[in-house]
Amino acid sequence: MANNKRRKVTGFINEAACLIFAALAMLVLFLILYYIFQRGIGAINLTFLTSLPTPVGIPGGGIGNALIGSGIMVGLATLLATSIGITAGIFLDQNPQSRLATITRSACRVLTGVPSLIKGLFIFTILVLPTGDYSALAGAIALSVVMIPFITLSSEEMLRTVSVTWREASYALGATKKQTVMMLILPTAAGGLSVAIMLAVALAAGQSAPVLLTALTSQFWLENLMQPTASLPVLVYTYGISPFSDWQQQAWGAALVLVVIILALNVISQLSIAIMNRRRGI
Amino acid sequence: MHKPNGEGFFTYFTAAAAVLILALTGSIFLVVLWGARPAIEAFGLGFLFAAVWDPVRDLYGAVPVIVGTIVTSILAIVIAVPLGVAAAIFLGELAPSWIKKPASFTVELLAAIPSVVYGLWGLFVLVPWIRTGPGQFLESHLGFLPFFQGPSLGVGVLAASLVLAMMILPTITAISREIMRAVPVELREAVFALGSTRWEMIVKVVLPISKVGIMGATLLGLGRALGEAMAVTMVIGNANLIPVSLLSPAQTVASLIVNEFPEAFDLQLSALLLLGLTLFTITFLVNVAAVWLVNRTSYRLKNQGGAVNGKQ
């Protein structure tokens, strides 16, 4: 009997250890969020969000051009990556067993794991190196390379949720493959696809290395796509490692803006998924 | 048979997107290789074995940064895997259902925080803490040992490994939890029926079956740690030396590229691209292995049901 008691105690101790480790992991998140809010909130006001950076020591500098630069690059990248990614997702969903689909799926998984820095080096070598010019366009294309494998895999997953019965009903009515995809599958999966896109936007918005290597940074407003541009993540990096306390303060402010945008996209996505699942009765 | 209008075109059009992705994957390697040609011609294989990185004399070797990359990533794995697997056991097996969902979501949110934010936090919160706390302790009490020699600057191998560990923890936790959840209920019930406790069920059934998948999750985390750029750059101290202690400043492949790339040209640029190519090759292999391991586990669990104990 003493043996049984020991087994129970062992179980209890180990389970408690697991609880503590899980709590520790969550504590890390709260610690990070706490510091970002505590140090960042003081930097944020309207001028900060809408004006150009100022030289060190001159008050009133802001992240306006970085917000615009990030917005434009992420926007363009989303357009590009969504069109390629969802089209490929349709192929994977329509021909799931084909050899091309299997290879593409593996390529996407591996591509997801390739460091985004390398994707930046790739775009740098084909777009920046020949012309010698860093540009917002190159930044956008680098971000789209980061997004494409993610959107492809998640859109396939979302298209898969449209049930076989529905598809068969559509074919039974004489619809072609194209009609079934365009008029049944895509509209039905629209909610899921928007979630996939939102998560991809959140992923791209936080990328700093690929943007630094392709769009560099800038102190001015973005006037055309062939210029270097400032962006939020790169600004957090350059200001963060600078030795000036007012720039460091602005780095915390910019980090707060970035984190709020990204976490909001993630929370909205999770809520939408929960609502869609409930509607489908899962 | 006659195909309806545009039907063949539709399939070809969507297939073209898939082919484009394959071309993209292949061209990343080829393009970076092309950019690295001058460095390959200048140094050849010796690049991988030379211990000097000196832009002033135009001499480039990969040893210091490769050692830095491997040391920080392995340390991060050593810290994050036990924590991550324990957290996954709690989130997947032990927690009451009303905690499971929100807690798992919280951990997944950690993965969404951009690396530059981890870097900023590391630089201003973790680094000062290491400098005065654990770093100071190591320097003054264990400084006579080879791997703990000071001075305690705060930035360095220890800071980089801790930040990396924080960053890969959610990946490892989330994937391990998914893999453990796939262990069939019948097996669990069978062990309970033999009179085991919940913990014995976890140790004797869930963990052995999930072992391969957890290794896959570990490799995915390793891949992420090896290639992580910004967060490491901000806390590692950026010294192109082979690290000799937890407290020494060092450099990883990714952090060196971030540091020197914007001002590099000619041979230095090409040497950085060659480093990038090396990193790409390493992470590519790690990821192929990881994807294979994770797929194998979930495939076996899905398709062989009860026969998962290696017998098929």
Image (spheres, helix red, strand yellow):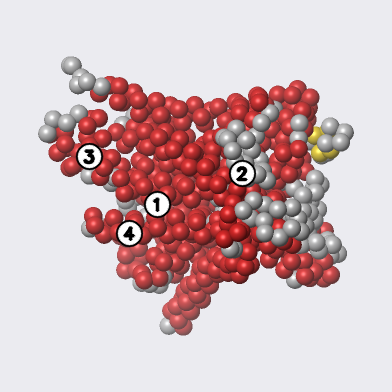
Q: Is mark 3 on a helix, strand or loop?
A: helix
Badge 2 local density, few (<14 within 10 Å), some, or many (20+)? some
Tell me the CA gap for discs 3 and 1: 42 Å
Residue nearer the viewer, B213 or A118: A118
Q: How far apart are the alpha carbons under marks 1 and 4?
A: 35 Å
Horizontal placement of B41 versus A82: left or right?
right
Say above or below: B203 vs B248.
Answer: below
Q: Is residue B100 visible?
A: yes
Disc sitting over residue B309 in the figure: 1
Looking at marks 4 and 3 on the same chain, the residue that comes earlier in the sequence is marked by 3
Mark 3 — residue?
A184
| In contact (CB < 8 Å): disc 3 and disc 1 | no
> Do the residues indicated by labels 4 and 3 lie within the same chain of the protein?
yes
Task: Locate residue B134 relative to residue A186 in the image: left or right.
Answer: right
Q: Which residue is drawn at 49% across and 39% down?
A: A77
- Tell me what residue is drawn at x 39 percent, y 65 percent: B101
The answer to whether tags 3 and 2 share a subunit is yes
Tell whether A140 sits left or right of B251.
Answer: left
Residue drawn at the location 30% of the way across and 25% of the way down: B10
Residue A17 position (above or below residue B165): below
Image quarter where the N terminus of chain B lies is top left
Subunit bearing disc 4: A
Q: Which mark is residue A221?
A: 2
